[in-house]
Amino acid sequence: MSLSMCMISIRVNDIEKAKRFYCEDLGFQFEKAYGDQLVELNIDGLPIIVEEVSKLNNLDYYDHSQIILGLKAKDLLTKMNKLKDKGIELLFEEPQKCPPGIFNVIKDPFGNYIEILEFQ
């Protein structure tokens, strides 16, 4: 049995706010809407399905098993400053070391964590 990646789903409680956050703040591209509660975004050719649900995520980054979206940055420090300027909270004040380089974590307005990595 062979599987391949075809999309990633992100669940949110406000589809319009999600489109603004992911497209304007993070640079995803809007592809199309499937009604009022489901949209397709795209980043680097990967479809991201954003679906509106009723409850926010309240998982703790450190203690809960979860799938985390990882985005690559060429210059993490510059990206961190741009995100701060947009009012996006960073989990760490300084980049954290990881085996392939450095990273930081942001939380989207719906409680979903996103890691931003710079490979070194």
Image: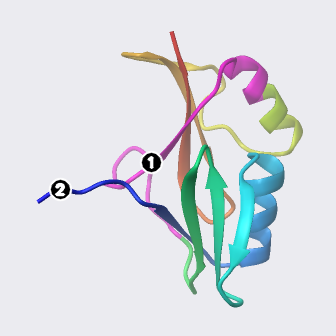
Q: Residue at x 44, y 48 (%)?
A: 61
Q: Is residue 68 left or right of residue 80?
A: left
- The amino acid marked with disc number 1 is Tyr
Q: Is residue 9 left or right of residue 105?
A: left
> Would you call the spot at circle 2 few (<14 residues within 10 Å), some (14-19), or many (20 or more)?
few
Q: Residue at x 73, y 28 (%)?
A: 80
Choose between 101 and 91: the one closer to the eye. Answer: 101
* Foreground: disc 2 or disc 1: 2
The residue carrying mark 1 is: 61
Residue lying furthest bottom: 35
71 part of magenta stretch: yes
Q: Is residue 33 left or right of residue 25?
A: left
> Would you call the spot at circle 1 few (<14 residues within 10 Å), some (14-19), or many (20 or more)?
some
> How many dots with numbers?
2
Q: Residue at x 74, y 46 (%)?
A: 26
Residue 1 picture location, percent across and down: 11, 60
The residue carrying mark 2 is: 2
For mark 1, give the secondary structure: loop
Residue lying furthest right: 85
Choose between 68 and 34: the one closer to the eye. Answer: 34
- The amino acid marked with disc number 2 is Ser
| In the image, residue 30 above or below residue 15 | above
Q: Quadrant of residue 108?
A: bottom right
Residue lying furthest front: 2
113 part of magenta stretch: no
For mark 2, give the secondary structure: loop
Q: Are marks 2 and 1 in contact (CB under 8 Å)?
A: no
Please give the range of residues in magenta.
57-80
Q: Residue at x 54, y 25 (%)?
A: 103
Residue 24 picture location, percent across and down: 84, 52
| Main secondary-structure element of the magenta-colored stretch | loop
Residue 41 picture location, percent across and down: 66, 62
